[in-house]
Amino acid sequence: MDNNYRVGLIVPSSNTTMETEIPAMLQERMKVKPETFTFHSARMRMKNVTPEELKKMDIDSDRCALELSDARCDVLAYACLVAIMCQGAGYHNVSEKRLSKAVEENGGKAPVVSSAGALIDGIKLIGAKKVAIITPYMRSLTDQVIEYLNGSGIEVVDSISLEVADNLEVGRLDPKNLIQYAEKLNIEEADAIVLSACVQMPSLPSIQEVENRLGLPVLSAATSTVYKILTELNLDPVVPNAGKLLSGDITIAVN
């Protein structure tokens, strides 16, 4: 049986973190599991994180899915959480179905996951109903993320918005600073912490450390996306030092 998998990434043109953190997690997994992965990207044009650019960018996701299906990827991940969440409740389901249909019609049938849907699934899988979140977005976009999570049955008990509009600058943020931000969150009623509700804001180096310090499960849009990628491929969703969700203690796959 072929243990090599092609992972297709649909990313904003200014995103630099998705192609860093997702390969880093799966390469770390390769140290403890037999499967190997290659990574293939297609880009949607977007420079500033505004509702107008996000909606315009989302249209490009169809083209990206088709391009990646030409490479016969085994799974595709649409990696822009807020582009989905600013479109209104439940849009991740609409997007995933539309893109899945596009790749199937192109003869490259493969599961399509979104970082938005993956984060919702990840929060529920660890048994969390209330979360505290950190985002790089302007407050108005963070409010849309909170509304989207609320509509999915997840209560956001506290949030921090770093208010960085330039997407390139988001990718340059120091993930270690998230340790200090996390300590400022009110987590008294929280079941879990979303350290980065954005696949462009780096957080991987701090996920396990924050979890160890604060004693709550810690996840991110990126770790949730990796969990969903692995379960869609029917592989063990295990990545060392990447938080509770990828610890191997979660056994129920999301379909």
Image: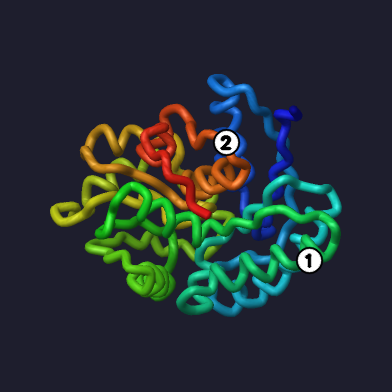
**124 sits to left or right of 238:** left
Q: Is residue 21 above or below residue 220?
A: above
| Residue displayed at 29% across by 51% down | 127
Q: Could you tell me if residue 183 is visible in this image?
A: yes
Q: Amino acid at mark 2?
A: Leu
Q: Is residue 237 above or below residue 47?
A: above
Residues under labels 1 and 2: Cα distance? 28 Å
| Residue displayed at 45% across by 27% down | 240
- For marks 1 and 2 on the same chain, the one whose residue lies earlier in the sequence: 1
Q: Position of residue 172 (x, y in %)?
A: 52, 47
| Residue displayed at 50% across by 37% down | 237
Quadrant of image for the N terminus: top right
> Which quadrant holds residue 149?
bottom left
Residue 235 is tagged as 2
**Which residue is tagged 1?**
63
Colour setup of the view: rainbow
**172 sits to left or right of 19:** left
- Mark 1 or 2, closer to the camera: 2
Q: Position of residue 151 (x, y in %)?
A: 37, 74
